Amino acid sequence: MTVESMRAAVIAIRAGIFDDVNEPDVVWRDQASGAAAPVTASRPDASSIQCAAFDYCHPVVLVVAGHAGAGASTVALAVAEGLAEARRVLLVDYAEPRRSGLLAAPAIEMGTDGAWRRGRRNRLDVVRLTRHPADGVLPPPPETDDAEPLRVVDAGWSLTCALLDPPGTVVGGAMVVLVTRVTVPAVRQTEQVLAALDGEAAVAAVGPARWPRLVEASCGPRLGELRSRGQVVAVPVDRRLQVAGLTGDRLPKPVAAAGRSLAALLVPARETP
């Protein structure tokens, strides 16, 4: 590293900026640089996102991260499996393949279909990008045999930044699940994401069901309101998932139960086909 690069890295760390702008899923255009950059420079340009990827002609559940490392992939899988108990669901992963949290989640691999790699997990269809688009334009999810599948999109942190810049341009027509850790820095960042959302959201709080007092004291007005209305679901931390990540095995029962609870908030039983 050059002296300039190390100086920029120290400035970024002090500012709480930890994105590596050299990673393919962060650099969407020609923004690669040897030095750390401000968050605004590392965010994808929202205008480069093809809106067909989030075509609301089909029902969409968008799982977004309230901050980096929130655990959006685990929650997206749990919600998708909860919804798949009553209808056909397509879980869409837009992460760069090397950084996908759902890389090993399918129990059966079913080959590639254009820009997508198909997989199957019990009743759940899972599709992942075969490669990250060089121009940053996201392809629409592949068609399925079902005329109207429910799509659950694992947005992750980098794509979440793009979808919220400018606020509300893309996420307004989707059912949103916002994932946060139960820590002071996490709920503070999550409050900022909630402020940028256009519409309602359910919140998956990864951590203890009973929040520490310091975390509760740091809870902002939007998140506090959602908690009072029962829109926040606790997702327990599982040690096996922390070590092994998501695999083709069944999700731990407490995590699966949290996914079903979130699914019930999004699609009440009376609306289920």
Image (spheres, rainbow, N blue to C red):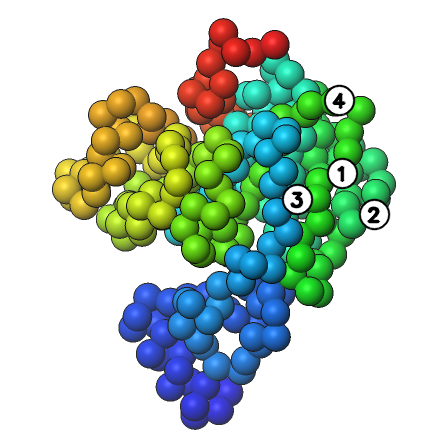
**Quick check: marks 2 and 4 in contact, CB under 8 Å?**
no
**Quick check: marks 1 and 2 in contact, CB under 8 Å?**
yes
Whole-percent x, y for residue 67 in the image:
39, 51
**Quick check: marks 4 and 3 in contact, CB under 8 Å?**
no
**What residue is shown with label 1?**
142
Earlier-in-chain disc, 3 versus 2 = 3
**Quick check: marks 4 and 1 in contact, CB under 8 Å?**
no
SS at badge 2: loop
- Disc assigned to residue 52: 3
- Disc assigned to residue 114: 2
Q: Quadrant of residue 128?
A: top right
Relative to 99, does residue 89 appear above or below in the rendering? above
Whole-percent x, y for residue 66 in the image:
39, 47
Is 223 on the left or on the right of 120, as rendered? left
Q: Give how far apart the Cα atoms at labels 1 and 2 are.
A: 8 Å
Which residue is found at the position 53% from the left and 62% from the top?
Answer: 45
Can residue 7 be seen here?
yes
- Disc assigned to residue 48: none
Whole-percent x, y for residue 191 in the image:
29, 46
SS at badge 3: helix
Q: Give how far apart the Cα atoms at labels 2 and 4 are.
A: 19 Å
Q: Classify mark 3: residues with Cα within 10 Å, few (<14), some (14-19) or many (20+).
A: few
Three-letter code for the amino acid on which mark 2 is drawn: Gly
**Quick check: marks 3 and 2 in contact, CB under 8 Å?**
no
Earlier-in-chain disc, 2 versus 4 = 2
SS at badge 1: loop
**What residue is shown with label 4?**
146
Whole-percent x, y for residue 76 in the image:
54, 35
Q: Give how far apart the Cα atoms at labels 3 and 2 are.
A: 16 Å
